[in-house]
Image (cartoon, rainbow, N blue to C red):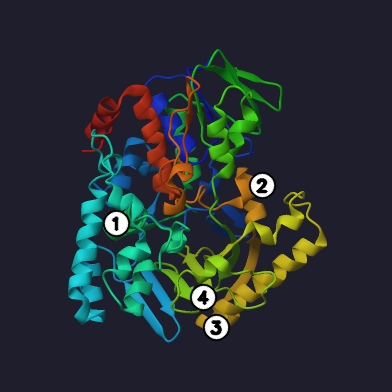
Amino acid sequence: MYDAAIVGSGIAGMTAAIVLAKHGFRTVVVEQGPKTGGLMQPFQRGNCWFPTGVHCLGSLAPGQILWRYFKYLGVLNRIRTVPMNQDNFLECRFPGSTFQLPYHHDAFRDKLLTLFPGERKTVEQYIADIRNTVARFSLYNLSAETERNPAEIQDSSLNDYLKGLTSSRELYAILTAINPFYAVPSDECPLYLHFLFMDSFLNSSWRIDEGYCSLAQAFEDSFKQAGGQVMCNSLVTRIECTGGEVKGIRTANGDFIEAPRIIFAGHPKQIPYLCADKALRPVFRQRLAEAEETLGVFGIAMSWADSQCPMAQTDIIVYDSWDTDEHYHQLLLSDKRLPRMLYFSGSPERTDGAYSVVGLSTMPFSEVVIWNDTKTGRRPESYNSAKCALAERTLDAAKQQWPSARTAATIKASFTPLTFRDYTLTAQGSAYGFKKSINAMYTARIGSNTRVKGLFIAGQSVVLPGLLGALISSVNVCCEIFGRELLVSDIVRETQ
């Protein structure tokens, strides 16, 4: 018998597992795939290592929030972090204009004032509102206080906020350009969501050297050192509940893992299929079923055989118009145009003469639903042909931006929302889980606790999307188990 069992080994699952193991809980992580890590797990093609879901990280400088969490989790000393270009961590390309943006709040403010000298009031207000908003989120600031989320930061959309500040098309586009990082259009994006992402990356921005040690391996090693056990190739088929309490989980291998605490760190829409009909309230089942997903992604993985790579220390987002939300409506397969938005990210260093570069764009699951009943490695020729053609169009878009790509860039792999679905069991291949829309705040935000005693939920669908959001969701679960004051004081003490 275990004290706790974790379903899923992504950032949320492994965070909870390490915290529990550090506090003396006999803990097991159960993973359906052959390796731990979820979207932390990179993949290799030839000599190139490509990230699956972790392309850049914010707030990893000493003393900053992700640095402190990684240090507490025993991960920081196992990985190699590489700072991005402080003067150009994010490059935004629009028709006829390119903007190179620095990190650090003051540098970012000064750059915007240089570009838009007549917008001083807007820029100063924007930076002040970021700082005031993020200060209200306790686990983002390692405070033992409960969250303080006034209605105005939950009910106000980013679009309404910015339209009230500026009439500048260009400034609006720059400030909304990072929306692919959380996949919510500006007119639906809660203000706090945008501010938390901006603040994290403005604190500092980093790459992980996947060739040195992947995040997935670092988390697994830290968990095992704390005494935890990992069970891979173990698909969970049932969460056993009796008398309103969890008893354990069953796997497709026929194993029963007994534990009085189950932390489910997969996609929440799987939960109703794993629990008995009467274990969960009908209204909760309905909420999960009706929650809207964020879009999936189409991507290409390229080797960049050149002495320089424009994406090595800089994330680059290319838009084909000044409307940063148009890509949410694009159809990549049926519309033969180039993607309306492309995000490019590269490895910090060359390996054997080449950089690893990933190019991503949003893609609705409806475009690949005709192949819904197929699996990775066993898809029909129609799928492979469509995917390859789209990969070549995406490469053509890169060649238009960087002429050197004509000789330097070679496609090594490509992937669609079906790929994400197969490897992570994520509904519709969703890139960021439930869509955090102001139009669906009730269904999009679910709690860490369930009505079933001992059953908890963690992951990016719970609190915030992305790596930091998934991590914080698990810290929040552990606060429910140990008490917020005790756990936060532990983290603060160990990361001073």
Identify the residue shown where x is 53% and y is 69%: 327
Cα–Cα gap, marks 3 and 2: 32 Å
Q: Residue furthest bottom?
A: 96
Q: Quadrant of the C terminus?
A: top left
Q: Secondary structure at mark 4?
A: loop
Between 388 and 354, the residue placed more toward the observer is 388
Of labels 3 and 1, earlier in sequence is 1
Cα–Cα gap, marks 3 and 1: 32 Å
Identify the residue shown where x is 25% and y is 43%: 141
Cα–Cα gap, marks 2 and 4: 33 Å
Residue 7: percent from left, percent from top = 55, 31
* In this view, 329 is above or below 149: below
Q: Which amino acid, mark 3? A: Gln
The residue that mark 2 highlights is: 422
Q: Residue furthest right?
A: 381
Residue 423: percent from left, percent from top = 63, 46
Q: Which amino acid, mark 4? A: Asp
Q: Which amino acid, mark 2? A: Asp
Of labels 3 and 4, earlier in sequence is 4
Identify the residue shown where x is 37% and y is 55%: 190
The residue that mark 1 highlights is: 199
Tag 4: Cα neighbours inside 10 Å, few (<14), some, or many (≥20)? some
The residue that mark 4 highlights is: 306
Q: Which amino acid, mark 1? A: Asp
The quadrant holding residue 477 is top left
Tag 3: Cα neighbours inside 10 Å, few (<14), some, or many (≥20)? few
Tag 2: Cα neighbours inside 10 Å, few (<14), some, or many (≥20)? some
The residue that mark 3 highlights is: 400
Q: Quadrant of the N terminus?
A: top right
